[in-house]
Image: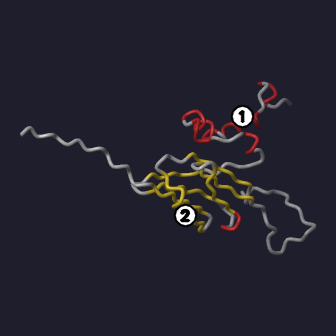
Amino acid sequence: MSRVGDSLNVDLAAAVNNLFNLPETVEKFMFPSSRAYDQHETSGVSSIPVDILDTAKEYVFVMDVPGVSKYEIQVTVEDENILVIRSNGKRKRQDGEDEGCKYLRLERRGPQNLLRKFRLPENADVAAITAKCENGVLTVVVGKHPPQPKSKTVEVAIA
């Protein structure tokens, strides 16, 4: 019996993988500079889904990092305005697991190598970055520089 993918000459695994990478593909198309790093740098690394909030005083990045402790997460700024969030998470053995045991099924998403880079806007204050990880949710807050005063035109009165 032939498989559907064989009859259509389609690699179903690659097609499904492309669906999972759709947000990154759209982001690259819409904002080419938002992912200013090489593809080889991300091999074997999972992308972290993120929500970004732009408020009057700060940018807030919120992402789920289940099973990753705050000690496994690194938040840095590269090249003056690229925010880098990475983690080298590893699945730990559960209490009661023997060295000789093996998983028959492993469906729960465990800690992974995670990497995400964001080009920060010009008004981002990289000296005012804070990060906290609580209950599997990482929140990174990047302050904003105050807006530059706009020039004011003064009318000259004729005496």
Q: Answer with the quarter of the image where residue 24 lies.
A: top right
Residue 158 or 117: which is nearer the viewer?
A: 158
Q: Residue 3 in the image: x percent, y percent? A: 81, 31
Name the residue nearer the viewer: 94 or 43. Answer: 43
Residue under numbered circle 2: 130
Residue shown at 8%/38% (left/top)?
158
Which residue is drawn at the image coordinates 16% and 40% (left, top)? 155
Instruction: Tell me if residue 37 comes above or below residue 140 in the rendering.
Output: above
The one nearer the camera, 115 or 48, is: 115
Look at the picture and state if 158 lies above or below 138.
above
Crowding around mark 1 (Cα neighbors within 10 Å: few <14, some 14 to 19, many 20+) is few
SS class of the residue under badge 1? helix
Residue 65 image position (x, y, % from top left) = 65, 59
Q: Quadrant of the N terminus?
A: top right
The answer to which quarter of the image holds residue 96 is bottom right
Q: Left or right of 47: which side holds 5?
A: right
**Residue at the image point whose x is 66% and y is 67% from the top:** 70
The amino acid sitting under disc 2 is: Thr
Q: Decide which of tag 2 and tag 1 comes sooner along the chain.
A: 1
x, y (%) of residue 39?
72, 39
Task: For mark 2, give the secondary structure.
Answer: strand
x then y, percent, for residue 64:
61, 58
Q: Is residue 18 above or below residue 97?
A: above
Q: The disc labelled 1 sits on which kind of residue?
A: Ala
Please state if 159 lies on the left or on the right of 41 as rendered: left
Residue matched to label 1: 15
Q: Residue at x 71, y 49 (%)?
A: 46
Spatial distance from mark 2 to mark 1, Cα to Cα?
A: 38 Å
Q: Which mark's residue is nearer the viewer, 2 or 1?
A: 2
Within the image, what quadrant is residue 43 found in?
A: top right
